[in-house]
Amino acid sequence: PSDHQLPPLEILCKQLYETTDTAVRHQAEKALVEFTNSPDCLSKCQLLLERGSSSYSQLLAATCLSKLVSRTSNPLPLEQRIDIRNYVLNYLATRPKLAAFVTQALIQLYARITKLGWFDCQKDDYVFRNVIADVTRFLQDSVEHCIIGVTILSQLTNEINQADTTHPLTKHRKIASSFRDSSLFDIFTLSCNLLKQASGKNLNLNDESQHGLLMQLLKLSYNCLNYDFIGTSTDESSDDLCTVQIPTSWRSAVFQFISFHPSIPLPTGNFTVRVCVWVQVLSCLVQIASVRRSLFNNAERAKFLSHLVDGVKRILANPQCLPDPNNYHEFCRLLARLKSNYQLGELVKVENYPEVIRLIANFTVTSLQHWEFAPNSVHYLLSLWQRLAASVPYVKATEPHLLETYTPEVTKAYITSRLESVHVILRDGLEDPLDDAGLVQQQLDQLSTIGRCEYEKTCALLVQLFDQAAQTYQELLQSTNSSAMDITVQEGRLTWLVYIIGAVIGGRVSFASTDEQDAMDGELVCRVLQLMNLTDSRLAQAGNERLELAMLSFFEQFRKIYIGDQVQKSSKLYRRLSEVLGLNDETMVLSVFIGKIITNLKYWGQCEPITSKTLQLLNDLSLGYPSCLVRKLVKLSAVQFMLNNHTSEHFSFLGVNNQSNLSDMRCRTTFYTALGRLLMVDLGEDEDQFEQFMLPLTAAFEAVAQMLSTNTFNEQEAKRTLVGLVRDLRGIAFAFNAKTSFMMLFDWIYPTYMPILQRAIELWYHDPACTTPVLKLMAELVHNRSQRLQFDVSSPNGILLFRETSKMITTYGNRILTLGEVPKDQVYGVKLKGVSVCFAMLKAVLSGNYVNFGVFRLYGDDALDNALQTFIKLLLSIPHSDLLDYPKLSQSFYSLLEVLTQDHMNFIASLEPHVVMYILSSISEGLTALDTMVCTGCCSSLDHIVTYLFKQLSRSTKKRPAPMATDDRFLHIMQQHPEMIQQYFADLRNSIVNSQPPEKQQAMHLCFENLMEGIERNLLTKNRDRFTQNLSVFRREVNDSMKNSTYGVNSNDMMS
C-alpha cells in the first residue's frame, strides 16, 4: 500500500478515538472490523506505524495487529508472527518516547503473540520463549528503555496468568504451567535484583523516569507473586482465603525479597509520588504475607513472620502514607493476612509482639472512629480481630496474647462509632450504611465473634448504651415539643444497638457458653423485647422501617440460638425472661414470635423488605426442627388465627387492588409454604378441614373464572387475582410433600380449575409477569417430590395430568415463538425464563415415574409427541451461546436432555440431522461448562446415546426377526459408516501421541494400548467397571508423563 491510503485511515482513527458522536463512532467501529478482515491489513498496519501522523494511528495499528494474532479461525502463519514480534521489539527499541498508551498497546501485542505461540517450534526451537533475551537489550540501555523492558516482562506475566474466553481453559493452563516452570522464576529473580539495586540508590522520585522505573519493577514483582501457580483460578471476591502457592525452589528468593522489600527508601519526591509507590509496595507485601505456610519449616517461618511484623510495626510507627485511601486499604489487607496465614501462637512469640498488638489496636480503634473514611477497608480490620478472638481458646503459647486488654477496646470503638455516625449522616444527608444490608451483615458476623471475647464487658457496654438510648427515646415520644429529627436519631441509634445485640447473641455458637453469659443474653433480649412492645404500640401512628428490619435480624439470631433443642430450657436466659417479662417457657416465647409476625404483616403489608423478612422468619419456624417445635406452634391461638383467616382483610399484602408490581407478590409463596406446613401437622385425611382452609383460594378461582367467561373484563384485575392465586397455590403444593395431603390438593385443582390456567397461558403468553408464575405452579404440581404423586391402579390421573402438561407446554411454546426477534437485553425475561420453566416441567413429568409413556403411541394419543416436538422447536430458537450463558436455562435443558436420552432415544434418533447435530454440539459445549451439574448431565447424555447406538448396532448384526421399523437416522448413518467412531478415536490417539516429544511417544502409545486391555465388546457392568479402572490408571500415567516433560525442572517440587 502507498501513502495515498493513509488519509482515510487517519480519519478512521480520529472518528474512533476522538469523536463524541456515538453514531460516528459506531460507523468507525464497523469500518475497523472490515479493516481487520481485509487481506492487506498487515501491510496497512505497518504503514500506520511507520508514517502515521498521530499517536492514534499507531494505537489503531497495534490494536488491529492484536486482533489478527488472536483470532482462532484462519490464524497467521508462524513466520509472520515471528516477523511481527521482532518488528514490535525493534519499534519499541528505536522509539522509547512513544505516547504511553501506544507503548502499552504494543507491549500487549508482544505479550499476546508470545502467549499464543508458546508451544510453536521452528527447527526444534521454541521461538517465542526467549523472553529474557528479548528484553536484556532494553535493560542495558537508558532508563526509558529499562522501563519498557520491565513493562514487557510485567505485561507478559499478567497476560499468561489471565485465561481468555476465545481459547480453551486447558490450553491456557498448559501454557501457564510451562511458563511457570521455564521462565517465571528467572523473571522474579531479575525483578528482585533490579529492586535491590534501586533500593541501594538515593532515588529521586521527582525524576519521572526514576519514579516510573520503580513503579514498573514493583508491578513486575507483584505480578510474579500474584501468579496462579497451581491453576486454582481464585475468585478475587474470596480475598480472605487467598494463599500464594509459591514453588519450593523459590524459598531463598522470597526470603531475600522480604529482607529488603519493606524498607525501600523513599527519601525524596513529593507526597503524591511516594503514595503511588507505597501502594505497590504494600500490594507486594500482602502477597508475601500470603505465601503458603508449608514453604518454610517452623524456624524459617518464625524468622519470616518476624520480618513481616517488623515491617508492619515500622509502618504503624511512621504512618505518613496511610491517609491515602488506596494505601490504607492495602495496609488493612496486609494486617488481615497476618492472622489468616499465621497462628496466634506464632504471632505472640514474635519479638515486640506486645508493642505491635498495641499499635494495631490503636490503629483499628482510630480507623473505626473515623467511620466515614474508606468504609470498605474496615472489613479487613474486623476480619483480623475476628480471627484473633476466635483463636483465644486454642492458643497454647505461654507468652501473653493481651487480647483480653485490646479486644474490648475494638468492640467499644465499633459500637460507639456506629452510634455517633447516626446524627452526622442525618444532618449532612450522607449515604446510610444501614441501607447496605450485605455490608452490615458481614460486619455484624465479624463483631459477633469479637464481642464474645470478654463478653462481660461487651454486655455491660450494650446495656448501658441501650438504656440511655431507650430512655431518651421514651422521653422524646412523651414530650410534646420534641423534633422529628431527634426522634429519628434515637431510632437510628437503637437500630444499630438491636442489630449488634442480635449479632452478639448469634455469636454464642462460637464459644462454649456459660450460665453467666446466658444470663447476660437474657438481659439483652429483655431490653429488645421491651423496645418492641413500645414501637409496636405506636405502629398505628408511625413506624421506622430500619428499626423493624433490625428487630427481624435480632429475632432470626434469637431463634437460631435459643429456640428448639439447641439449649437447655433451664437456661438462665429463660429464667431472666420469666422474671422480667413473664415468659415462663418456650411456648410463650414462640407466641411472642408469632405475635410480632402478625403485627408486621398487619401494619407493614405494603413494605416489601419487612414483609419478605417477616415471612422468612415464619417459614424458618414452620420448618420445625425439632418436630415438637411445630406442634407447639400449631397449638398457639395466633397460628390458628392465621390458618383460618388468611385473607387480604387481615393481611393486606394478600390484596390484589394495590398498585405494586406483579413481581412483588413473590412473598405470597413463602407465606403459603409456611401455612401449608403448619396445616399438615394435624390435617391427616380430614378433607373438610382442607376444604375450609382452601375457601379463600376457591373464591379467588371462581372470581377469575367469572371474569374470563365474559368478553369485557378488567384485565389488570384478572391478572392480579390469578398471579396472586397461583403463587399461593405453589406455596401450598411445595409444602404438601406427603401423598395424602397432595392428593387432596390435586383433586381440588383438577379438573375443575385447570382450564383457567390453560386459558391464562393462551391470553397472556407475551406477559412473563403472568405466565411465569402459572408455569412454575404447573412445574410444581407435576414434580413427584417424596413420591407424593402415586395414583391408584385404576386411576387415569397420571396420563390426564401429562395431557394437561403437554397442552400447556405446547400452547405456551407455539405462542411464544410468534413473538419473533426479542432484544438481547429482554430475551431472558420475555422468552428464555418461561422456556426454562417449560423444560423443567417436562423433565419433572418425564422422570416422575407415574406415567407409562408407551400407551400414547399405542392408542394414537399425540400428547407426548406434541410436547417433544414443542421442546425441539423451542430449543432450535435458542442460540448455543444462550444455553450456557443463562445458568437456570442450562441446568433445566441439560437435565431434561439427560432424561430424554435415557428413556426416549427412539425420538432423538428419529430427528432431522441438523437437529441431532444441534443437540450433539450442545453436549460438546456443555462438557467444558464450569457448572458441574451441566457437565455431568452432558456425560450421562453422551453415555445414553452411545449405549443406544451400540445396542442397536449389535442387534442389527444378529440373525433374528427384524424389529418394528422406526425412522432411526442415527442407526442408518452408523450402519453406513461403522468405522466412524473407531476412526475418530484412532485419529485422536495419533494426534496426542505425535504431539509428545519423540522420546515420550512410545510411552504415550503404550498408555493408549493399556486403556483397552481386558475390555470386551459389551456394556455389562463388570466390563464398564474394568474400563473405569483402566481410565484412572491412564489418567495417572499421562499426568506423570506431562509432569516429567522436558520443559520444566521445577514442576515436581510444587508442593514438596
Image (spheres, rainbow, N blue to C red):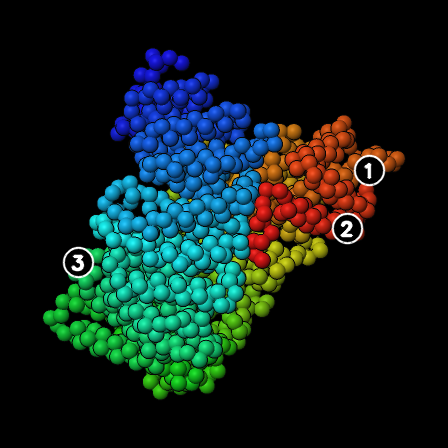
What is the distance, in whole Å, between disc 2 and disc 1 at their CAs?
A: 24 Å
Residue that appears at 35% across and 33% down:
103
Crowd band around label 2 with a 10 angstrom C-alpha radius: few (<14), some (14–19), many (20+):
some
Sequence-earlier tag: 2 or 1: 1
Q: Is residue 180 left or right of residue 93?
A: right
Q: What element carries label 3?
A: helix
Q: Is mark 2 on a helix, strand or loop?
A: helix
Instruction: Identify whether 691 is placed above or below 52.
Output: below
- Residue under label 3: 428
Task: Where is residue 216? Give x, y as percent.
Answer: 35, 44
Task: Where is residue 84? Give x, y as percent.
Answer: 46, 26
State whether residue 707 appears in this view: no
Residue in front for this viewpoint, 596 or 1035 = 1035
Task: Where is residue 865? Give x, y as percent.
Answer: 64, 37
Sequence-earlier tag: 2 or 3: 3
- Residue under label 1: 955
What is the distance, in whole Å, between disc 1 and disc 3 at their CAs?
A: 82 Å
Residue that appears at 51% across and 60% down:
295
Mark sitting on residue 1026: 2
Instruction: Identify whether 975 is placed above or below 784.
Output: above
What is the distance, in whole Å, between disc 2 and disc 3 at their CAs?
A: 73 Å
Residue in front for this viewpoint, 74 or 851 = 74
